[in-house]
Image: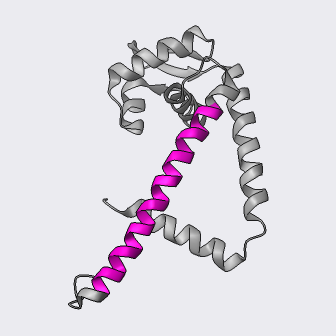
């Protein structure tokens, strides 16, 4: 649609609107970063956001090989390994032998980690639902649709 435009004024109006979207993404990313720091601290004051992200992925996914975690989170395996060591020291991660390949191990969240991450997630989910429950249904559906389109960008 934009490529078909020839009018410079129309292009400027669209570019200004896109700049507004870009600005809102910047605000959202800043809030997400802050939220991740806060979530990590709610699980444990010594937990860093990256370690929280790894831990919450393990809670969602169950026991996972380091290479799979690295792929899921788009991180280098060495970063996963360092963070796993820290999580293990905090008592949030345990290593389990792979029954099909005894040389390999799975990383798994401990019961304590599962409980804490779940508590944080549920509290955040309640807050999201409480804040969005007042929105009109068509707006919620449109937001979900637009977010899905954003998530499909660059695929």
Quick check: 132 above or below 48?
below
Taking the image as shown, residue 9 lies to the left or right of residue 119, namely: left
Q: Quadrant of the C terminus?
A: bottom left
Query: Which residue is rendered at x = 44% and y = 66% of the image?
Result: 21
Which image quadrant for residue 61? top right
Query: Which residue is rendered at x = 72% and y = 63% of the image?
Result: 132
**How many labels sit on residues?**
0
Query: Which residue is rendered at x = 40% and y = 24% of the image?
Result: 66
| Front residue of this view, candidates 23 and 57 | 23
Q: Is residue 105 visible?
A: no
Q: Is residue 63 visible?
A: yes
Which image quadrant for residue 153? bottom left
Q: Quadrant of the N terminus?
A: bottom left
Main SS of residues in magenta: helix
Taking the image as shown, residue 122 lies to the left or right of residue 17, namely: right
| Front residue of this view, candidates 145 and 69 | 145
- Whether residue 27 appears in magenta in the rendering, the answer is yes
| Front residue of this view, candidates 86 and 67 | 86
The location of residue 146, given as percent across then percent down, is 50, 70
Quick check: 58 above or below 103?
below
The location of residue 115, given as percent across then percent down, is 73, 27
Quick check: 29 above or below 36?
below
Query: Which residue is rendered at x = 46% and y = 19% of the image?
Result: 83
The location of residue 99, given as percent across then percent down, is 47, 17
Q: Which residues are magenta?
A: 10-39
Residue extending farthest top: 89
């Amino acid at each position: 649609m934009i490529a078909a435009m020839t009018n410079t004024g129309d292009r400027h109006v669209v570019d200004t609107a896109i700049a507004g979207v870009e600005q809102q993404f910047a605000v959202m990313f800043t809030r997400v970063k802050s939220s991740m720091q806060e979530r990590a601290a709610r699980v444990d004051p010594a937990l860093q956001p990256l370690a929280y992200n790894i831990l919450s992925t393990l809670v969602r996914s169950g026991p996972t090989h380091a290479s799979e975690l690295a792929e899921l989170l788009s991180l280098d395996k060495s970063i996963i390994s360092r963070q796993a060591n820290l999580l293990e020291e905090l008592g949030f991660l345990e290593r389990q032998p792979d029954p099909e390949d005894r040389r390999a191990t799975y990383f798994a969240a401990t019961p304590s980690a599962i409980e804490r991450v779940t508590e944080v997630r549920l509290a955040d989910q309640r807050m999201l639902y409480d804040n969005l429950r007042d929105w009109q249904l068509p707006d919620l559906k449109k937001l979900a649709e637009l977010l899905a389109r954003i998530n499909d960008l660059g695929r």
